[in-house]
Amino acid sequence: MRDWLRHHPNVRTIRVAAVDLNGQARGKRVPVRFADKIVKDGTRFPYSVLNLDIWGEDIEDSPLVFESGDVDGVLKPTDRGFLPMPWLEAPTALLPLWMFHDNGKPFEGDPRHALANVVRRFHDRGLHPVCATELEFYLIDDSGRELRVPPSPRSGKRRLGADTLALRALDAFDVFFTDLYEACEAMDIDADTAISEAGVGQFEINLLHSDDVMKIADDTWLFKQLVRGIARKHGFAASFMAKPYPDWPGNGMHMHFSMNDDEGNNLFDDGSAKGADLMRNAVAGCMKAMPGSMLLLAPHANSYERFVPGNHAPSGIAWAYENRTSALRIPSGNRRARRIEHRVAGGDINPYLMMAGVLGSALLGIEDGLTPPPPVTGNAYDLDLPQLPTTWPTAVDAFAGSAEMARIFPPELIENLVRTKRQEIRYMEELAPDEVVELYLDTV
């Protein structure tokens, strides 16, 4: 871990950071001379720091604050090690952390531990999830009173309309994307294809699939920070906010996953057109748990503005083969790559909680041998389907009372997240619509 710093002698400061329940990086700026001590002993900050609201404020009724004396946990480096921070001017390293108690036990309020626990349960059954994420974001000029697409660095012009899968839309921001891909390589983030999307200034980049689920979650979390940072370096904003523009499509975060055995065979593929029973067990688990997991897929006030019929943000609970109007899609193509695409989440998610919720739901379907209803055909928006929670408060209540979520997450994390969101709901009522956009634009 220290070898990386030896090969980067220009680094003078490091950032040490863990992820809180809202997906925010919480940590410290440290002179590089203390790096060895942190690698060996970790660092400390209060447990409550991983349970702050979206403004960075304490949760008023949290037992982690005054009731306990706001005691410290121990933050230890993850196996990711030191990474460059290419969006900063001075050479700087980031050391991702996660939280433990003094006795070495993981802190159950840490979202990274929640995902690690789900992955461990799969491995105990000889199952190995293979995951990939697709992230949509907008490039935005937020320097004025109204949000606009930034002018092209090449032409100086602003494109006023969407241009789906247009090379010219990508070429207009070629310098930005070149810097972004170089930064991904430096940070060991496996970025794949970039495309222009259906919104003005909207793009999508896929991260390559891997059976290292923790790395995919880390990559997704780091990628969001990187995109926002590189965009600011180029003079504009990048936003994963679910719905920054009322009249343009929202930002989704689709997750693909399959299931390997110990030898690397895809257990979702049985050679048939419909796929293996294990795949349908996983589909049924995701469907059954979807109402309770909605808070993980749509965690913020603005998240619910994305669910507009016809904009590829499904609000009905259904699955289908090669059908982008359904919540769960089984893509076509090589059957050896048979997988499930979960299409509900927005770009504003905490990737650790979202992936833990989706994979944990699939595991429940496998453990319980669940069978899904028949796959739908045609336009799922026109069908009479069971519906997901459509408001933030109902999603919080559904998560709090979900028997499925209680089988996936520890009680402490569920309680902390529910307290956090209920506090945010109270204070969000005081904000005007433009203040909500300002809050979320390059925060989530």
Image (tube, rainbow, N blue to C red):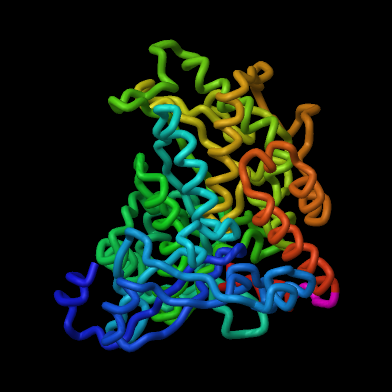
Residue 109 in sight: yes
Instruction: Tell me if residue 169 comes above or below residue 307 in the rendering.
Output: below
Side of 379 where 101 appears, left or right = left
Q: Quadrant of residue 364?
A: top right
In the shown orientation, is residue 231 left or right of residue 51?
left
Q: Which residue is rendered at x = 50% and y = 45% of the image?
A: 117
Residue beneath the point at 60% across and 35% down: 361
Q: Position of residue 192 (x, y in %)?
A: 33, 50
- Residue at far top of view: 272
Which residue is more in the foreground, 318 or 354? Answer: 354
Q: Is residue 110 magenta?
A: no
Tally of marks: 0
Q: Quadrant of the C terminus?
A: bottom right
Q: Is residue 178 visible?
A: no
Q: State left or right for residue 226 relative to residue 148.
A: left
The N terminus, quarter of image: bottom left
In the displayed structure, would residue 363 be above or below residue 376?
A: below
313 or 60: nearer the viewer:
60
Q: Characterize the magenta stretch by its predominant secondary structure.
A: loop
x, y percent for residue 269: 41, 19
Of residues 262 and 249, the one nearer the viewer is: 262
331 lies above or below 68: above
Where's residue 123, x and y in %?
A: 41, 34
Along the viewing direction, whichever of 189 and 164 lies nearer the viewer: 189
Which residue corresponds to the image point at 80% horizontal and 63% vertical from the top-left?
A: 422
The span shown in magenta is 430-434
Query: Is 267 displayed left or right of 404 in the figure?
Result: left
- Quarter residue 443 falls in: bottom right
